[in-house]
Image: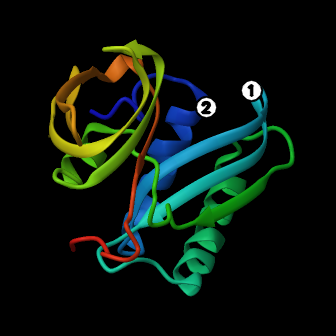
Amino acid sequence: MSSQTEGNSLKAKLWRLLDPVVADEGLSLWDLNLVGASGRPQRIQVFVDRDGGVSLDDCAGVSRRMGAVLDVEGLLENAYNLEVSSPGVERTLHRLEHFQQYLGESVRLKLEYAVEGRRNIHGSLQAVNEEELEVDIPDVGLLLVPREAIRRANLVVDFAKGRKE
């Protein structure tokens, strides 16, 4: 089970509720963020994806379905804004599956603490498991980065070169 769906937090409950709605539209739930006061989200950001990307119509359609489900289920006590979008080309990587999908690609990591004297890392993602990433940094070589050290991880696209599909 994904850490996104474990437990009884509001985020976990929303993930379990919305994931099937997204899947019914032929999309995958990439990420979900709650923005606002603790326990009372003012904004729900949902990122959806599929092979070949998502269109504005995809986002609008799944947003309508999610809104209806959220209103019926009553998980949210206060008013909310629902935002549905693509994770973008330089998407944030969170889950193990995200990292596995982009092995061999260029990534940028911002770390909570220094690893081998570095808090910012840019290199090619070579391997990943539950505990760590292996990143090949130009002119440095392979660096093992504990996943717990990662504050933010993003895919990096060289627009001159493009990204492998």
- Is 162 on the left-hand or right-hand side of 74? left
Q: Residue furthest front?
A: 139
Do labels 1 and 2 touch, CB within 8 Å? Answer: yes
Q: Residue at x 24, y 55 (%)?
A: 105
Q: Residue at x 39, y 56 (%)?
A: 156
* Quarter of the image where the N terminus is located: top left
Q: Is residue 59 above or below residue 70?
A: below
- Is 146 on the left-hand or right-hand side of 149? left
Residue 11 position, x and y percent, is: 57, 35
Q: Amino acid at mark 1?
A: Gly
Most foreground residue, 48 or 144:
144
Most foreground residue, 30 or 17:
30
Q: Which residue is mark 2?
A: 10
Most foreground residue, 69 or 36:
36
Secondary structure of the residue carrying numbered label 2: helix
Q: Is residue 106 above or below residue 110?
A: below
Residue 104 position, x and y percent, is: 16, 53
- Is 127 on the left-hand or right-hand side of 38? left
Q: Which residue is mark 1?
A: 39
Q: Residue at x 51, y 83 (%)?
A: 55
- How crowded pointer 2 is (Cα within 10 Å; few <14, some 14-19, many 20+) is rated as some
Q: Amino acid at mark 2?
A: Leu
